[in-house]
Image: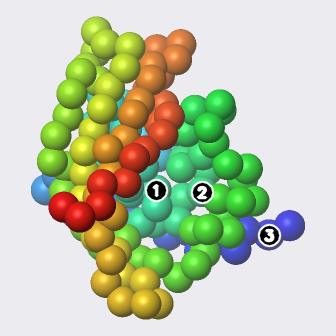
């Protein structure tokens, strides 16, 4: 079955969607194209935002722990709902460094949906498996 999600790849010289201020080719680009792995949980989190923002179902899934990940079809369907991910603010990172096995990243992700603007405030948990950071789960923060 063909993918429902439209996948757009930014230019290497364009500003990275994840909001570090770096260009795509020096930021999330090499992670999405599998030239290298994320060194920290926060880098992986940023690359996942970029995957959602650009419709890269493969990277969104690849960076998800197999224990908790949806199927490719489920993820493709949910990414094709018309939501446009506009901006990421990383609020806090705990552990998630080169010598850690677990990490926590708290962020706010700004989106435009069919119902209007929306902010997803989430505390995400990451685990390192065979040297690679993977997203495990997220808890949505409400009322903040
Ligand atoms: Zn980036």
Compared across the picture, whether 37 is left or right of 122 comes to right
**Distance between mark 1 and mark 2 Cα atoms:** 7 Å
Residue 75: % across, % down = 64, 59
Compared across the picture, whether 135 is left or right of 24 comes to right
- Residue 88 in view, yes or no: no
| CA neighbours of label 1 inside 10 A, class few (<14), some (14 to 19), many (20+) | many
110 is higher (above) or lower (below) than 117: above
CB at disc 3 and ligand 1 closer than 8 Å: no
**Distance between mark 1 and mark 3 Cα atoms:** 18 Å
- Quarter residue 119 falls in: bottom left
Residue 8: % across, % down = 49, 70
**Distance between mark 3 and mark 2 Cα atoms:** 12 Å
107 is higher (above) or lower (below) than 100: below
Which numbered disc, 1 or 2, marks the residue that appears first in the sequence?
1
Secondary structure under tag 2 reads: helix
CB at disc 2 and ligand 1 closer than 8 Å: no
Q: Residue furthest right?
A: 1
Q: Name the residue located 54 percent from the left edge and 47 percent from the top edge.
A: 59
| CA neighbours of label 3 inside 10 A, class few (<14), some (14 to 19), many (20+) | few
- The way the protein has been coloured in the rendering is rainbow
Q: Which mark is residue 27?
A: none
Residue under label 1: 51
Which numbered disc, 3 or 2, marks the residue that appears first in the sequence?
3
Q: Kindly check if marks 1 and 2 are in contact, taking CB atoms under 8 A apart as contact.
A: yes
Residue 85: % across, % down = 37, 71
Residue under label 3: 2
Q: Kindly check if marks 1 and 3 are in contact, taking CB atoms under 8 A apart as contact.
A: no
């Amino acid at each position: 079955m063909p993918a429902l999600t439209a996948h757009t790849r930014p230019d290497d010289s364009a500003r990275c969607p994840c909001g570090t201020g770096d260009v795509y080719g020096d930021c999330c680009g090499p992670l999405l194209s599998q030239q290298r792995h994320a060194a920290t949980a926060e880098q992986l989190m940023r690359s996942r935002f970029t995957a959602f923002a650009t419709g890269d179902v493969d990277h969104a899934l690849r960076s998800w722990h197999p224990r908790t990940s949806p199927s490719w079809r489920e993820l493709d369907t949910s990414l094709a709902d018309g939501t446009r991910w506009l901006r990421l603010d990383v609020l806090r990172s705990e552990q998630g460094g080169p010598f850690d096995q677990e990490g926590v990243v708290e962020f706010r992700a700004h989106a435009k949906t069919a119902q209007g603007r929306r902010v997803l405030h989430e505390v995400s948990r990451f685990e390192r498996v065979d040297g690679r950071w993977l997203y495990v789960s997220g808890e949505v923060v409400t009322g903040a």
